[in-house]
Image (tube, rainbow, N blue to C red):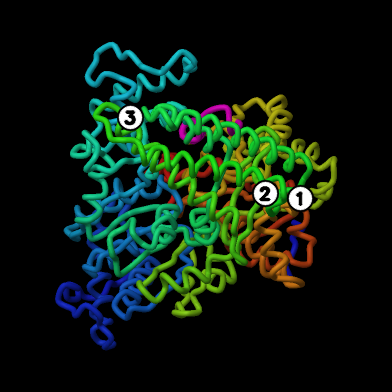
Amino acid sequence: MRSFDPDEELEGPPAGPDLDDLPARAVDDDLVDAAREAVTAALDRVTAALPAAERRLGQEQMAGAVAEAIYRGRNVVIEAGTGIGKSLAYLVPVALSKKRTVIATATKALQDQLRDKEVPALRAAGVPIESAVLKGRQNYLCRQRLHDVAEPGAVDVELDLGDDAPEGVAAHLRRIVAWSQSTDTGERDRLGFEPDARAWSRVSMPAEECPGADRCPFGGTCFAEDAKRRAERADVIIVNDALYGAHLSTGQTLLPHHEVVVFDEAHELDEILSRSLGIELSAARLRGVAGLARSSGVADAKPVADDLLAAADLLAGVLLQRVAAGSQVGLDVATRAALDDALRATERLVVAVEAAPPNAGGDLRRLSARGAAVHLRSDLVRLADPGEDDLVFIEGTERSATLVRAPIEVGGLLASSLWTEVTAVLCSATIPAGLEDRLGLHVSPAERLTIPSPFDYEHHSLLYVPTHLPDRRHGDAEDAIAAELIELIRAAGGRTLALFTSRRALEAVGRAVREEVGTPILLQGERSREALLAQFGEDEATSLFATMGFWQGVDVPGRTLSLLTIDRLPFGRPDDPMLEARRERAGDAAFRTVDLPRAAMLLAQGVGRLIRTAEDRGVVAVLDTRLATATYRSSMLGRLPKMRRTTSHAEVVAFLEAATAHTTDGDHGSETRTST
């Protein structure tokens, strides 16, 4: 073996008192100890009732730390390795604290898992918890919009879509109409299939277009309003980071007042909040507002809508020209002129719809047009006058481009509006270096706690860096990667999740590998994410090639995932406008403080897909020689689990053969699920 060197059953405590018996803000050490004991006892009851019951020392440690943070009113940042069970570790102390808490997740899928899996586990064990999931309004079916396109209750659905609606959109709308007759939540994520975005937009209502429940004939049965009412009654409100960002950007008006906030998958928080606290404007949005004006029933709005359409065409042309020229940062003269045209048309549109008298037949559409126009006017004003800490840039392609204004750093806003107002728990399997500084936690210093994974990485996994490959940045690297993958996949008998940092590389390498191996190869984009993961999890011989969207939140336990490959170290693109702005601010320290921590965190997240249970075994192959040769390799390797390391292809083949042959009594199977 040739290796490379980076530099080179428990006894539980007695049950404590219920937290109901403790004061709301315990500062006495004895009372805090009692709180930790109560949480440990409750956690024991919850985990004992699970199908795979086991006590986890790390989970108890995390739960106790969360309880202490809540009762001392101190913020805490917890890096909890894979297998700790962090969802239950924060849910139990949150439930027993009786303090209203918002749990913010990085994804809507994790919201649903907390509601459908973790919260019922607490209730089944006798831990009282009143929770509710709340999503953005556009995630709920709008009964008024549904009424506009289909007759409710009709057996043969006739849709009023106009003459130009594609058949695929119509087919999805028919399925949505059928589903609408049985759903009790109206949530898009409960639909059972991924709808065409154009179809869902016909039956959903963005917040800025909603006329309000008191003005809508369906206000009393509105799905979104019902979700809000449930959230107002709940002790624990489960949202996603984007909605929490919208809550902050609107002066904290979207969510009920709360004393505690838990940010799960906190490593993504600054990136998500930067976008949700910003503004996005595209020509399609201008055209959408113009369309609402045309259908509003306001005669004076129609000629103004034509002007807004012309402004949309002008903006589209300017943005696409700038993308083609590689000039994507800032506001030039042409962009400002296009924004001015759009603003003038939008202001006249607001005047027209506000001056129109109410009418029984079309007033809801008039109010929707007014709301969308007022919101657009506000965004146009803010886009034209960015602050010193904001970056304005264009993202997209020469076919479709969006103008974005976003804060370069979110720490200042969070420092002034959040950390001193609530007790915060931030947790993830990977907490990047410097996260506290980027989030502004200096105003209310947070304790950082690191709890290692309980899994035996040293004996159950192997990290392979094939140093015989060419430099990943060279033109011939992808051919060599394809050849390496062919051999590895054959040795593993399929069972491979191949992760790529770009869609182009995925498709080029994926097609080459598919032609040579005898086992199924799935490529991202060929089917929905859910369908790909389902097929991958059900068939051990299948391999899945995917991009960054699969680096996080994918949990495929068992032999079906025995080989995880990563095509290159996940450094950000040199031309990424936001990263470049942060690099400029960091100066000479940019690589060390911006690029390296981010890449190390993403690499650790990707590697974390391999070992998901105590019985899992497998190989991580990083097909980028820099992990074995670069001067910064120790920083990246230090973020990974303590796996054995090798550069020997023969050793990897032997390990894979042993790993895929390994079986245990009572095998856990290969159920695919979202990670917690």
Place of residue 138 in the rendered image (x, y in percent of width and height, measured from the top left) = 38, 40
Dot label at residue 145 = 3
- Judged from the image, the secondary structure of the residue bearing numbered disc 3 is helix
Confirm or deny contact between disc 2 and disc 1 (CB under 8 A). Answer: yes
State which region is magenta: 523-536
Name which quarter of the figure residue 253 lies in: bottom left
- Judged from the image, the secondary structure of the residue bearing numbered disc 1 is loop
Place of residue 661 in the rendered image (x, y in percent of width and height, measured from the top left) = 54, 41
Q: Nearer the viewer, residue 175 or 643?
A: 175
The type of residue carrying mark 2 is: Ala
Q: Nearer the viewer, residue 209 or 669?
A: 209
Which residue is tagged 1?
Answer: 466
For marks 2 and 3 on the same chain, the one whose residue lies earlier in the sequence = 3
Q: How many marks?
A: 3
The type of residue carrying mark 1 is: Pro
How far is the residue under mark 2 from the one under mark 3?
A: 50 Å
Q: Residue at x 22, y 34 (%)?
A: 218
Name which quarter of the figure residue 157 lies in: top left
With 545 as the anchor, is 530 left or right in this view? left
Q: Nearer the viewer, residue 597 or 126?
A: 597
Q: Nearer the viewer, mark 1 or mark 3?
A: 3
Residue 579 in view here: yes
Residue 170 to residue 558: above or below: above
Which residue is tagged 2?
Answer: 621
Place of residue 30 in the rendered image (x, y in percent of width and height, measured from the top left) = 25, 87
Q: Nearer the viewer, residue 551 or 593?
A: 593
- In which quadrant will I find the N terminus? bottom right
